[in-house]
Image (cartoon, rainbow, N blue to C red):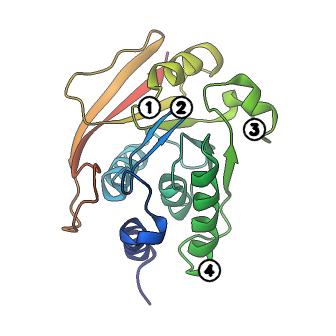
Amino acid sequence: MQDPQTTLNAYYEVISKDPKYRFEMGYVKETNTGVFIPSSIDIVRQAFRHLIEGEIMDPLQPFLDAGCGDGRIVALATSLGIPAWGIESDEELVALSKQNLINLRKLAVLNSTPARIHRGNFAAAATYQILDKSFSEFGTVYNYTNNHEQVGEMIARHSPPGTLYILYSGDEQTEEFPGLTLLEELFLVDQTGRDIVDLELDQAFVRIYDKT
């Protein structure tokens, strides 16, 4: 049987190149809250493993992908045993990400660990009224430099001390957020050797902030 992590990589590589799943801009989509550009699953996996092994990230704490796109980071987190939620404003991407989670469960990539997708604006307080979690309950929040200032502000205002903010970025300039402390800056390279799709990064900075 194929390793679940290998299957996860292969699954998203296939759909990102399949014409029926591509948008006007390729496998990139402009939404009313920003632009969806897929994160490298391998880069984020490396970051997760580093943080979990270093006991910086608690894998038992709820995880939020703020702007989850096609659901790949929610799927990755869940495949590693991390209970994960994703919020996305775009109706088409929400439908795609939900179907992806269904397909990945059938492929045995995901187990019984919670994985949920909700439609809404991740920066709006009203969105969390429809969830079974308040924003302050998420121990780790992930974002791909898309309205990242608003996410940082929400963590600073509403999250308890110790909450992690994982920011995926192609920018060499380190972002700063009042009320948050930069714990680590990782420069990681996608090690899968696959063809990179459209604007996806094959190397990126992953910055980890802590609510002080």
Circle nearer the viewer, 4 or 1: 1
At mark 4, the secondary structure is helix
Query: Foreground residue, 104 or 120?
Result: 120
Q: Position of residue 157 (x, y in %)?
A: 61, 13
Q: Residue at x 60, y 44 (%)?
A: 90
Q: Earlier in the sequence, mark 3 or mark 1?
A: 3
Where, quadrant-wise, is the N terminus in this rendering? Answer: bottom left
Label 1 Cα crowd, 10 Å radius (few <14 / some 14-19 / many 20+): some
- Whether residue 87 sits left or right of residue 31 in the image: it is right
- Whether residue 145 sits left or right of residue 121 in the image: it is left
Q: Name the amino acid type tagged 1.
A: Asn
Q: Position of residue 125 (x, y in %)?
A: 71, 23
Q: Which residue is mark 4?
A: 106
* Marks 4/2: CA–CA distance: 31 Å
Vertical position of residue 197 compared to residue 200: above or below:
below
Q: Which residue is mark 3?
A: 133
Query: Foreground residue, 63 or 99?
Result: 99
At mark 3, the secondary structure is loop
Q: Which residue is mark 2?
A: 33
Q: Earlier in the sequence, mark 4 or mark 2?
A: 2
Q: Which residue is mark 1?
A: 146
Discs 1, 2 touching: Cβ within 8 Å? yes
Q: Name the amino acid type tagged 3.
A: Lys
Vertical position of residue 79 compared to residue 177: above or below:
below
Q: Earlier in the sequence, mark 1 or mark 2?
A: 2
Q: Name the amino acid type tagged 4.
A: Lys
Q: Name the amino acid type tagged 2.
A: Thr
Q: Residue at x 39, y 50 (%)?
A: 28
